[in-house]
Structure formats: structure tokens, C-alpha cells
Amino acid sequence: MARKCSMERADKVAGGFARARKNIVIQYQGRERTQQHLLDMIRQDAIAQGVSEDDILEIDVYIKPEEHSVFYVVNKETEGKIEF
């Protein structure tokens, strides 16, 4: 019985929101971009800048729809900008 209770607790901790499939869409002035679309564009742009896909460990993304821009930093060293 203890095993079942432990599994139920683990499911509650890792379940719900943490395990839910998420779909993020950014909308601004008639434009719409999904999280995955932006990440794909960032990946392509970073690779075009010479970053190896295998070397990408961290990506920080800053969305500024009022400037129609998405800024990003790969591995805290390579900066880039794509159009929103």
C-alpha cells in the first residue's frame, strides 16, 4: 500500500499543470505566432549565424511585438533578432 501512496503523491507533484501539454500563442495587431514557430525561426537564424545545433544548450527569448521583433541569446553569448 505504501508504494501506491508514494506513486499517487509523485503523480500529484508531477501531474496536472507540470505534465499538461501547453500551447502558447502570441497575438499582436493582427499577427499571431506560436511558441514553436518562433523557436523554429530562432533555431534557423542561430544556425545561419554559425552556431552548431548540437552546441545549443540555452536560449533566452525576448518578445517585443510593439517593435515587431523577437530578440534571443544562445548560450549567453550569441545574440540575434528575428521578425515577429
Image: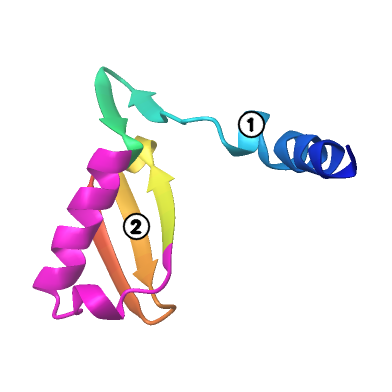
Instruction: Say what amino acid the circle numbered 1 marks.
Output: Phe
Q: Would residue 41 be counted in the magenta stretch?
A: yes
Asked if residue 84 is positioned above or below residue 73 in the image, the reply reads above
Q: Say which residue appears at 62% left-offset and 38% top-offset.
A: 18
Q: Nearer the viewer, residue 57 or 31?
A: 57
Mark 2 or 1 closer to N-term?
1
Q: Is residue 18 visible?
A: yes
In the image, 10: left or right of 68?
right
- Mark 2 in CB contact with mark 1 (< 8 angstroms): no
Give the quadrant of residue 33.
top left
Pointer 1 residue: 17
Instruction: Say what amino acid the circle numbered 2 marks.
Output: Phe
Q: Say which residue appears at 29% left-offset and 81% top-offset.
A: 55
Q: Position of residue 64 (x, y in %)?
A: 39, 44
Q: Main secondary structure of the magenta part?
A: helix
Q: Crowdedness of circle 2 by 10 Å Cα count: few (<14), some, many (20+)? A: some
Pointer 2 residue: 71
Q: Which residues are magenta?
A: 36-59
Q: Is residue 84 visible?
A: no
In the image, 66: left or right of 10?
left
- Colour scheme of the picture: rainbow
**Which of label 2 and label 1 is nearer to you?**
1
Residues at marks 2 and 1, CA–CA distance in whole angstroms: 28 Å
